[in-house]
């Protein structure tokens, strides 16, 4: 080490040229011992080498040029190694980053790693069972390694005071650590949410109902949570339909979805889960559009460093809508369209890699699989439909069946068919009210008893045709065959008479049968006829017609006599 570890603030000097002179003096020390490898360590190095843009100060630019010239530049020092640490890599100069040959990301521990870090607590107290450790692993979601270590130390100190430590005290300790290390889940912390909802991780079916581990078909990495329809839609790969799961009644916001999201991450051993909503932007002091994009870019770059990560977008809190409720037109549009486009493009980058075969999966030195999960939580119908269309989110089996049914129905509405009420041919899409004149009853034969008086339309039509033929044949004969006494039971008019039909509507099924009868599959003509035969008013009228017909005086038949 040619100097003690320094921070960027110690190297930045107020007077012009002092920073550059200090850097040159420190790095030139390596020239005095060319036979040894020398190292220089700078903490928060982003303050020393910021991006060179229009807003950069000239003193910062001069300091960057000095560093670049001594690191693989014209004044390169071959035995000098520069170590830097930063939390804002995206704010650093690109040329300087290219000179850094190795970039090491120190991220948050995965659920499996956190469990290994917390397992020693089992040896300290009998209170810590495997079930309690699993709960602590979920409570410590997004904790850094230092935060988990601090929580473990706090628990050890607490156990020295009280051997029977209870769950609420553990949550208080975890909440204190989370706030100290700025580990937020929206506007609050995970331990604080668990304190308000003690049974949030005690669902009986959470292991299978919340699991994201699919053996047969791999997921695509995109999840849409519809708070309006209470559905959780999980998209799959390989042209498979989307899985649809029902939300619980209590799942109405991001905080109430905590158990589902964390349990899903545990089943995939996902390293970090980040919630992006209005509260996140508030915590980052991101007020204008540029600050919002900067905060999101920083978070996205951090998540890209993990092999497994999950981003949760609260679409309703991030995207603002303009709604017009004027009398002339009603319209809805997105106000912050640039932010919507930024999030939309990120939602297209979800990926879940799978091993090609079991042999690759069993290799110890196989590369880590990349999993980038995107969860979209939305409630507004306009935002939901717009987002689904823009990112081409796959449909569920129910949606595919409904779409197929609507397509077949649209094609079927263009084909000509016979109306079951008026027996005329019609095209469903062209029919309108007033096109159909019909009877909503049945035909009766007054010459028969009430039990057998009902006559079908086909039989009635055939009998009337036979009567017409006999009438022509018997035109010049003295004996006439009586005309069938057929009447409509609904309006009590004679069948085949000149009276108009008693009902007016549009062609098609009666309204009460539209949801019960499939005209493409069922014998709808017979079904409608049987439906009209159950008309209570028509049945009552039929009895009345037959009774009055029987009471009429019988006509006498007078035969002609021959004269002698």
Image (tube, grey):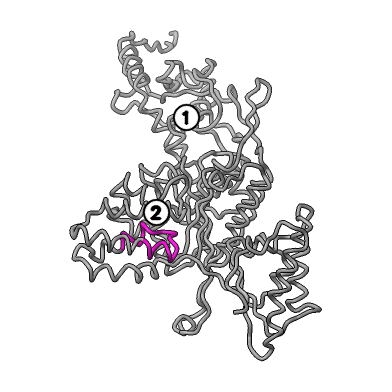
Q: Which residues are magenta?
A: 134-150
| Location of residue 328 (image quadrant) | top right
Q: Position of residue 380 (x, y in %)?
A: 54, 38
Q: Is residue 480 magenta?
A: no
Q: Secondary structure at mark 1?
A: loop
- For residue 260, which numbered disc appears in the image? 2
Residue at the (43%, 53%) spot, across then down: 180
Is residue 237 left or right of 444 when viewed as pictured?
right
Q: Nearer the viewer, residue 144 or 234?
A: 144
* Residue 485 versus residue 417 in the image, above or below: above
Magenta stretch secondary structure, dominant? helix
Q: Nearer the viewer, mark 2 or mark 1?
A: 2
Mark earlier in primary sequence (2, 1): 2
* Res 164 → quadrant: bottom left
| Residue 560 vertical placement versus 139 (above, below) | above
Residue 510 shows which numbered tag? 1
Local packing at callout 2 (Cα closer than 10 Å; few below 14, some 14-19, many 20+) is many
Could you tell me residue 460's position as x and y percent? 45, 29
The quadrant in which the N terminus is found is bottom right
Identify which residue is drawn at 60% across, 26% down.
Answer: 432
Crowd class of label 1 (few under 14; some 14 to 19; many from 20; radius 10 Å): some
Occupied quadrant, residue 337: top right
Judged left or right of residue 42, residue 201 is left
Q: Is residue 142 magenta?
A: yes
What element does badge 2 sit on?
helix
Q: Name the foreground residue: 535 vs 460.
A: 535
Residue 532 at x, y = what percent? 41, 28
**Which quadrant, please, contains the C terminus?**
top left
């Amino acid at each position: 080490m040619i100097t003690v570890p320094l921070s960027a603030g110690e190297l930045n000097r107020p007077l012009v040229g002092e920073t550059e002179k200090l850097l040159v003096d420190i790095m030139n020390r390596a020239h005095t011992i060319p036979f040894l490898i020398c190292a220089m360590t700078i903490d928060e190095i982003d303050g020393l080498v910021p991006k060179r843009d229009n807003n950069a100060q000239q003193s910062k630019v001069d300091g960057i040029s000095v560093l670049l010239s001594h690191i693989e530049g014209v004044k390169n020092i071959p035995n000098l190694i520069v170590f830097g640490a930063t939390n804002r890599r995206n704010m650093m100069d690109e040329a300087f980053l290219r000179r850094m040959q190795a970039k090491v990301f120190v991220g948050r521990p995965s659920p499996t790693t956190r469990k290994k870090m917390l397992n020693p607590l089992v040896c300290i107290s009998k209170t810590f069972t495997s079930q309690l450790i699993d709960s602590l692993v979920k409570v410590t979601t997004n904790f850094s390694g230092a935060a988990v270590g601090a929580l473990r130390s706090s628990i050890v100190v607490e156990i020295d005071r009280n051997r029977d430590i209870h769950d609420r005290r553990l949550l208080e300790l975890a909440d204190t650590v989370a706030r100290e290390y700025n580990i937020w889940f929206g506007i609050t912390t995970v331990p604080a949410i668990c304190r308000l909802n003690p049974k949030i991780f005690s669902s009986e079916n959470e292991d299978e109902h919340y699991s994201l581990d699919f053996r047969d078909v791999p997921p695509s990495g995109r999840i849409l949570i519809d708070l309006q329809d209470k559905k959780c839609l999980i998209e799959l790969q390989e042209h498979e339909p989307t899985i649809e799961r029902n939300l619980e009644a209590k799942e109405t916001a991001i905080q109430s979805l905590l158990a589902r999201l964390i349990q899903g991450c545990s089943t995939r051993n996902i390293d970090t889960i980040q919630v992006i909503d209005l509260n996140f932007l508030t915590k980052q002091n991101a007020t204008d559009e540029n600050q919002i994009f900067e905060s999101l870019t920083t978070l996205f770059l951090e998540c890209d460093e993990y092999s497994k990560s999950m981003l949760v977008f609260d679409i309703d809190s991030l995207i603002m809508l303009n709604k017009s409720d004027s009398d002339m037109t009603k319209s809805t549009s997105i106000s912050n369209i640039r932010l919507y486009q930024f999030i939309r493009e990120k939602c297209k980058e979800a990926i879940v890699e799978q091993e090609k075969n079991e042999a690759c999966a069993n290799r110890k030195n196989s590369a880590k699989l990349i999993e980038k999960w995107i969860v979209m939580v939305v409630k507004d119908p306009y935002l939901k439909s717009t987002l689904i269309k823009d990112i081409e989110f796959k449909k569920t089996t129910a949606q595919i069946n409904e779409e197929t049914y609507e397509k077949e129905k649209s094609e079927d509405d263009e084909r000509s068919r016979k109306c079951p009420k008026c027996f005329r041919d019609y095209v469903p899409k062209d029919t309108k009210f007033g096109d159909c004149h019909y009877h909503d009853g049945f035909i009766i034969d007054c010459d028969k008893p009430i039990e057998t008086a009902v006559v079908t339309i086909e039989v009635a039509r055939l009998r009337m045709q036979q009567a017409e033929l006999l009438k022509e044949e018997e035109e010049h004969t003295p004996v006439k065959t009586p005309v069938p006494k057929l009447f409509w039971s609904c309006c009590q008019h004679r069948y085949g008479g000149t009276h108009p039909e008693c009902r007016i509507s549009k062609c098609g099924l009666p309204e009460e049968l539209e949801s019960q009868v499939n005209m493409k599959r069922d014998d709808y003509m017979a079904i409608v006829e049987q439906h009209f035969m159950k008309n209570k008013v028509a049945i009552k009228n039929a009895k009345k017609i037959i009774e009055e017909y029987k009471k009429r005086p019988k006509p006498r038949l007078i035969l002609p006599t021959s004269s002698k």
